[in-house]
Image (spheres, rainbow, N blue to C red):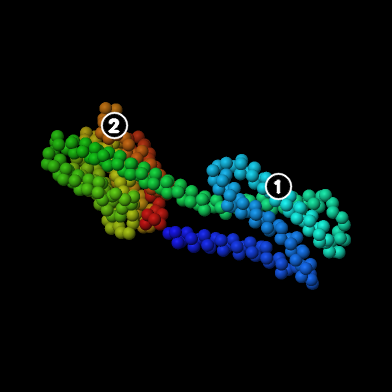
Amino acid sequence: MSGHIQKNRILQVAIHAIVWGLIIGLPLFFFEENFAGRRMIRYWDFFIIPFSLAVVFYINYFYLIDKFLFKKQTYKYLFWNLLLIIIVSMGIRYWKDLNFINFPPPPEMVKMGPRVWYRDFFFLTRDVFSLFLAAGLSVAIKMTPQWIESENTQKELEKRRAEAELKNLQNQLNPHFLFNTLNNIYSLITFSPEKAQQAVHDLSKLLRYVLYENTGNYVPLERELDFIRNYIELMRLRLSDKVKLDVSLPQAVTGMNIAPLLFISLIENAFKHGVSNTCQSFVSICIEIVPQEKISCCIENSFFPKNEHDKSGSGIGLENLRRRLELLYPNSYLLHTEQTGDRYSTLLTLFLKPEYK
């Protein structure tokens, strides 16, 4: 690891040396004076600008950013930068004036007339602006890795928070499912002990899936459908002749994944609120699949709202479902519920992204 860091540092130093070498050295080859001395005079007059840019850049890069900006002392950082740029700008003007006195300009520049204040002001403004750009470039280069690291850290924290919330929702859902199922089995005991015994046996299969086989965020769709079939068969045991149950589930599904226990909350509610042992009632469950595109669950049932004394279930099922959908299928689902008289319908559609397929 340390060797890799050392190589990166050597590469960074080499890149900086090459870039500044090109900036400072290349102009030397483009001056057209016939005499080497004249060429060097013009070069030294030019040299002060990139040299000053490098001074501001590296004082920021190696000192000011670490000492002030990384410590959130923005005003101090701006103050010292302003002071630095003023000093360097004065140095540039002094160097050029000294060079002007010691090495008079060529005849073609004399034709431009004497120096005037607004020309000096223009060059001073240009130099100050260039120095500010050098300081800004230093900040961008120095802080970009930190910004990227901070962004990655934030994403990792968000991912862990979402995973923790999903785990918490899953932990809420498991006892909620168990409570509702046991409540249904309890109602069987009074009129059919044999069916209740069979229901307990079937419940053990369901619990194996709920507790041990769906620990990940996604499971194979065929396993989820098998779980739904088993649950519906368990619920069928307690239905009287007054209840009409229609079920349509895909038979053979391979190569598709789904978040577990999404549809089961809706199916639970259908049996909880749509079944009456004294009145004619119905439950219709239909799951359709467009391969690699979407999965839809449409449920219709008669509606018998529970009274306030009915404590079967805690009411967290739908709330839990909506939050899990937001976490697992953000902007990729449609959940619609509608009550018309004594009829209640629910449609949940999951639009599959590549990672879900």
Residue sitting at x 50%, y 61%: 8
Q: Which residue is mark 1?
A: 86
Up/down of 14 relative to 330, above or below: below
Left or right: 185 with respect to 39?
left
Q: Quadrant of residue 82?
A: top right
Residue sitting at x 30%, y 46%: 261
Left or right: 139 with respect to 273?
right
Nearer the camera: disc 1 or disc 2: 1
Depth check, front residue: 290 or 200: 200
Helix, strand or loop under label 2: loop
Q: In the image, which disc is placed on residue 34?
A: none
Depth check, front residue: 233 or 326: 326
Q: 10 Å neighbourhood of mark 2: few (<14), some, or many (≥20)?
A: few
Up/down of 90 relative to 43, above or below: above
Q: 10 Å neighbourhood of mark 1: few (<14), some, or many (≥20)?
A: some
Number of marks drawn: 2
Amino acid type, callout 1: Ile
Question: Can residue 81 be seen at all in this image of the molecule?
Answer: yes
Amino acid type, callout 2: Lys
Which comes before the other along the chain, label 1 or label 2? 1
Question: Can residue 345 be seen at all in this image of the molecule?
Answer: no
Q: Position of residue 90 (x, y in %)?
A: 74, 50
Q: Position of residue 357 (x, y in %)?
A: 37, 57
Location of the N terminus (image quadrant): bottom left
Q: Which residue is mark 2?
A: 306
Depth check, front residue: 6 or 285: 6
Helix, strand or loop under label 1: helix
Residue sitting at x 22%, y 45%: 207
Residue sitting at x 56%, y 61%: 13
